[in-house]
Image: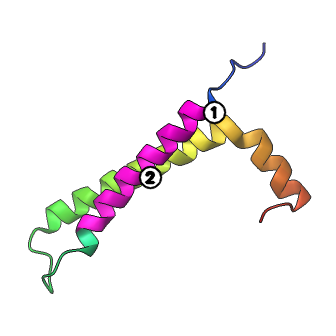
Amino acid sequence: MGHAPIDLQATTRDIKNRCARASGNLEQIAQTKEPIFPDPRQIMLELVLAQHEVEAAISIMKRAWWPVITVVVALGLSA
């Protein structure tokens, strides 16, 4: 049984959006001016949310492009 076609434009948009959300979570941490985090629980939440977004983006990327990624790596064609 074959795989269903993947909408690569929609997949690309999804990955870009997830990266933007992860970046936003991390940017909030990076912009903190205090020498010690005033709310460590909020910082941990931002880190975990960023981690989930990145992990989801990796999973989506593998599903959509894994055959291409495997060939590129196997042939040593990476940039």
Q: Residue at x 10, y 68 (%)?
A: 39
Q: Residue at x 87, y 55 (%)?
A: 74
**Callout 2, which amino acid?**
Cys
Check disc 1 and report the residue beneath it.
Answer: 8
Spot occupied by residue 64 in the image (x, y as percentages of width and height): 66, 35
From this viewpoint, which residue is outermost toward the right?
A: 75
Q: Main secondary structure of the magenta part?
A: helix
Q: Earlier in the sequence, mark 2 or mark 1?
A: 1
Left-right relation of 78 to 42:
right
Measured in 3D between alpha carbons, the distance from the residue under mark 2 to the one under mark 1, in whole angstroms, is 16 Å
Q: Which mark is residue 19?
A: 2
**Callout 1, which amino acid?**
Leu
Q: Give the vertical position of 62 relative to 54 (above or below).
A: above
Magenta range is 9-28
In what element is the residue under mark 1? Answer: helix
Quarter placement of the N terminus: top right
The one of 41 and 19 positioned closer to us in this rendering:
19
Label 2 neighbour load within 10 Å: few <14, some 14-19, many 20+: some
Q: Residue at x 21, y 65 (%)?
A: 43
Q: Quadrant of residue 41?
A: bottom left
Q: Quadrant of residue 36?
A: bottom left
Left-right relation of 9 to 25:
right
